[in-house]
């Protein structure tokens, strides 16, 4: 069909849809979407199955989940917002703060949804290259803030490269950003962080009135398929976010799963500790092979495969491991099933000689 009479915003017409990590064949490991290899926590499936009023709308305010989270973080329910995934909240925040002529600053490379979030809001992306070690260059990000900036996104640990922002780095950064600019601290992988120096956003909300913290049930809690994420921040900002939200989009099943998961903290921490330990082992072994792996604090590791990224991704696929390739920079591999580890390490070993000691290796950006 060539005739396209309907007007589409030009920036949207050229915007690619969000590209999901590849699905894996039945005998392959899907390590391309930073999902949790564990099923939901005990009791969660039962709680979901008990929600059978499919003919009724869910609670549009997700009040029960917000009440538990508010209690946990010492906030009021209005200082908590629940949405169908934290990616939905990113869209809501961008729409609430920014429009044509406004700028949103974020590190690059970072979470691949950020550029689309900004464009859909009608605003302009200002991407600040990461440091050579894969971490945010927060000085450069603060310097990129202008009178047009409405929002800055800080992703810690950074997806896909892995390093965290430290508490000290974050405080220094906030000192350089006007309080009229909203700072969004995207902590989608917070539960996996073991570095004691890492920033912890929830404890800083009182200090910074322009801070919103994003968390999700998709990663550590293993509920990616049920779509529940949340924001913590000032009530008036989250009221604006709620006004931008698509109503009724957090299902009753998602809310029940989130509530049941929040009651299973001990099991959650045990699983998270197991995945973090596996991550640390994989990083140590990859570094032992000669890979220049940045500090990994999420549930994924980054291999700087440079110009050979597509070929390296193909080699992993051939070995039965689906990874996420970001050509021409590198590959992100999620920490998944124990059974995938030997294949992963074996394939990485077969690739390392041709990549890290040649001009193919690029700085991590
Ligand atoms: C940094 C980051 N933020 C947010 C999200 C969105 O997660 P969800 O919408 O499932 O809560 C992801 C998912 O991969 C992510 O990596």
Image (cartoon, helix red, strand yellow):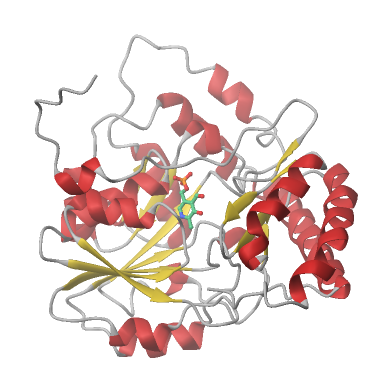
Check the image and report above or below for 231 versus 203: above
Does residue 45 appear anywhere in the picture? Answer: yes
User: Could you say which is closer to the camera, residue 183 or residue 346?
Assistant: 346
Q: Residue at x 87, y 48 (%)?
A: 343
Residue positioned most to the top: 55
Image height of 38 relative to 166, above or below? above
Give the x, y percent position of residue 328: 56, 63
> Does residue 137 sit above or below 55 in this rendering?
below
Residue 162 image position (x, y, % from top left)? 61, 67
Could you tell whether 271 is left or right of 166 in the image?
right
Residue occupying the point 67% across, 72% down: 360
Which residue appears at 24% of the width and 81% of the height? 145
**Where does residue 163 sit, x and y in percent of width and height?**
59, 73
The quadrant of the image that shows the N terminus is: top left
Residue toward you, 52 or 357: 357
Give percent across and percent down for residue 300.
66, 58
User: Does residue 77 show up?
Assistant: no
Please tell me in which quadrant of the rendered image residue 290 appears: bottom right
Depth check: give the residue in front, 6 or 156. Answer: 6
Question: Where on the picture, by quarter, is residue 356?
Answer: bottom right
| Number of numbered discs | 0
- Residue at the spot x=23%, y=48% of the render? 120
Q: Is residue 62 above or below residue 157?
A: above
């Amino acid at each position: 069909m060539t005739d396209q009479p309907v007007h589409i915003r030009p920036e949207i017409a050229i915007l690619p849809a969000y590209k999901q990590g590849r699905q894996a064949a039945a005998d392959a490991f899907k390590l391309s979407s930073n999902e949790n290899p564990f099923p939901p926590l005990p009791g969660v499936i039962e709680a979901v199955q008990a929600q059978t009023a499919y003919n009724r709308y869910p609670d549009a305010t997700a009040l029960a989940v917000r009440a538990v989270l508010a209690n946990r973080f010492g906030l009021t329910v209005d200082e908590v917002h629940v949405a169908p995934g934290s990616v939905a909240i990113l869209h809501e925040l961008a729409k609430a703060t920014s429009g044509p002529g406004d700028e949103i600053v974020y590190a690059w490379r970072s979470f691949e949804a950020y550029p689309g979030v900004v464009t859909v809001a009608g605003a302009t992306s200002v991407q600040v290259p990461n440091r050579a070690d894969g971490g945010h260059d927060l000085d450069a990000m603060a310097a990129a803030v202008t009178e047009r900036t409405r929002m800055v996104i800080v992703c810690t640990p950074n997806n896909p490269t892995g390093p965290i922002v430290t508490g000290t780095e974050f405080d220094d950064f906030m000192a350089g950003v006007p309080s009229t600019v909203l700072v969004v601290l995207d902590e989608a992988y917070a539960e996996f962080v073991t570095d004691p120096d890492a920033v912890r956003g929830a404890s800083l909300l009182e200090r910074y009135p322009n801070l919103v913290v994003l968390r999700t049930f998709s990663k550590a809690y293993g509920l990616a398929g049920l779509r529940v994420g949340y924001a913590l921040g000032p009530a008036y900002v989250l009221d604006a976010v709620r006004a931008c939200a698509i109503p009724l989009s957090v299902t009753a099943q998602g809310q029940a799963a989130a509530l049941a998961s929040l009651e299973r903290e001990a099991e959650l921490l045990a699983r998270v500790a197991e995945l973090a330990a596996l991550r640390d082992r994989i990083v140590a072994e990859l570094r032992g092979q000669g890979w220049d792996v940045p500090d990994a604090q999420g549930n994924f590791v980054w291999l700087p495969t440079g110009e050979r990224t597509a070929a390296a991704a193909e080699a992993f696929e051939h070995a039965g491991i689906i990874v996420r390739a970001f050509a021409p920079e590198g590959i992100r591999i999620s920490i998944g099933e124990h059974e995938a580890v030997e294949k992963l390490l074996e394939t990485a070993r077969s690739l390392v000689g041709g990549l890290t000691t040649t001009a193919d290796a690029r700085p991590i950006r």
